[in-house]
Image (spheres, rainbow, N blue to C red):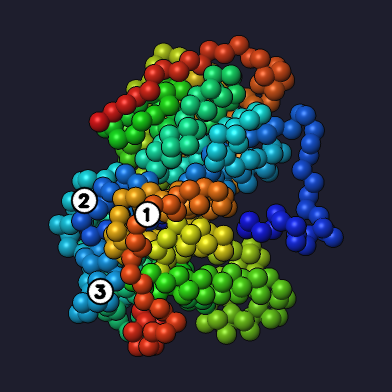
Amino acid sequence: MTDIGTMRVKSGLAEMLKGGVIMDVTTAEQAKIAEDAGACAVMALERVPSDIRAQGGVARMADPTKIKEMQETVTIPVMAKARIGHFVEAQILEALEVDYIDESEVLTPADEANHINKWNFKVPFVCGAVNLGEALRRISEGAAMIRTKGEAGTGDVVEAVRHMRTIIGEIHHLQTLDEDELFKTAKELSAPYELVRWVAENGKLPVVNFSAGGIATPADAALMMQLGAEGVFVGSGIFKSADPARRAVAIVRATTNYRDPQILAEVSVGLGDAMPGIDAAKMPEELKIQTRGW
Amino acid sequence: MGHSDGKRRRDWILSPEPIPASADVPVVGVLALQGDFREHRVVLGRLGAVTREVRRLDDLADLDGFVIPGGESTTIVKLMHEYALDDGVVALAGAGTPVYGTCAGLITLSRESVEGGAQTLGLIDIVVRRNAFGRQVHSFEADLQMPVLGDAPVRAVFIRAPWIERCGNGVRVLCSLQGHAVAAEQGQVLVTAFHPELTGDTRVHGYFLDKVRAHMAAGGDVVQNVTQLGRGVVR
């Protein structure tokens, strides 16, 4: 019997991406640079997060023409972002046969109460989360991969660190609780009890967890890996830097060798300027993207 | 995490399971540049092997077996070349050490791929088609017969998987699907297009470890008929 679109197949692709770097790209040329640098996948979007921030306006799914060009140019998986709750963008992306859909807070949300019912799709979804409850809600909706949100388009890793430490800390806490307490905790987390229990028993999320939002240097990538990320997304950090091709290679090497300071030092040399950053901690709440998602 | 190995480790009171140091416990390296290397380590560990993550050339020393996991073949092949691990693995296989590759590992070990894009190691005489079953929306799982594992079918998970387009004479096909070979072996080299490491069925890894143990029992001096078939450079 042959089964398509099972959770094992969906989360299985995320397992294959582990230890890798997924790079935001807006054109086929950028996708090629990413693939040549050793990216394990590319993420198609119409503007990188720092441009969305700077230019404002409504941020939508990428132009299908661009996505097709990327699919024809690279052999690594091509992912694409859909707006939160915009299940028709997701239907279109599935029809285009993108390999993963990111239901992303970086784009302007289309629904302020509901996320996409991801069980309705054969294509797998990755979703952002700032804490364990949010991660488990997304998984209960059918997400096959999680990424911590960080604060996209800032080049400031502080929020990525906060979110990763929060989720890992909450998982550690769950492991100290007995069954009686897990019922209450599931309620507090606004997450399904069965998932909460699974996490308590296994000490990890049931799906792969990457880090995103603010990674701009090889050191940032290795930091997130040492904190427990299983791979990293890099958005504006590469194509808004002085030498994208070189920085892309360096971030890939740093992610592979995240525990080897000697290699981290070698790859950090001569990269030119990183993307100009924004201090995320000093940013007004209303400008933060991470609060989108419910 | 890195700092758990340092001076301030706090697990000295309840020390973890001692790693068996016995000479008859196989030490299997798992390529850890990218992909699902952790899952391979878990399965091999369940079967009694000691595993080691391989990222650099010196990690290849004194291995009894070697695994290339699933992942992105383009990425894995590129990173192997950057760290000279391609030559290292060819030398390891040349010394008769059993090698197993799943999915991206199958592509990496093959002679060449029909559509190009990846420079492969040429350790098994097969020509592969990458993403042969289509993009992720066509990924699937299925029950397949693999006679060397006995009568019970193996639950095979195919993720943007390749198939084997053509085999050389020395290659034994172990399992087929839709008329295409999806598992094969040649001497000490075993490949599957699917991912037994994701299913909890340990039989394929058990079959591989049989090769590893036979190699160890022979003192590592098994007469070697794996010859490198020449690097397939395409595109």
Task: Give the farthest residue toward the left.
Answer: A65
At horizontal 54% and vertical 41% (from top left) the residue drawn is: B55
* Badge 3: residue crowd in 10 Å (few <14, some 14–19, many ≥20): some
Measuring 69% from the left and 81% from the top, which residue is drawn there? Answer: A181
Q: Say which mark, if any, is on residue B192.
A: none
Taking the image as shown, residue B46 lies to the left or right of residue B150, namely: right
| Residue that sits furthest to the right in the current view | B13
> Can you say which quadrant of the picture contains the C terminus of chain A?
bottom left
Asked if disc 1 and disc 2 are in contact, CB closer than 8 Å, the reply is no
State the residue at coordinates (44%, 53%).
A268
Q: Chain of mark 1?
A: A
Q: Is residue A256 left or right of residue B15?
A: left
Q: Which residue occupies the foreground of this view, A27 or A128?
A: A27
The answer to whether marks 1 and 2 sit on the same chain is yes
Report how far apart the C-alphas of labels 1 and 3 lie in the structure: 25 Å
The amino acid type of the residue labelled 3 equals Ile
Does residue A235 sit above or below A15 in this rendering? Answer: below
Same chain shared by disc 1 and disc 3: yes
**Residue B210 visible, this angle:** no
- Could you say which is closer to the camera, residue B69 or residue B131? B69
Amino acid on which disc 2 is placed? Glu
Residue, x 65% and y 78% (percent of image)? A182
Chain holding disc 2:
A
| The disc label shown at residue A29, or none | 2
- The reply to whether label 3 and label 2 mark residues of one chain is yes
Chain for numbered disc 3: A
N-terminal of the pair, mark 1 or mark 2, is 2
Q: Secondary structure at mark 2?
A: helix
Above or below: residue B15 compared with residue A85:
above
Task: Indicate which disc, 3 or 2, sits on the residue closer to the N terminus.
Answer: 2
Q: On the picture, is A177 further left or further right than A198?
A: right
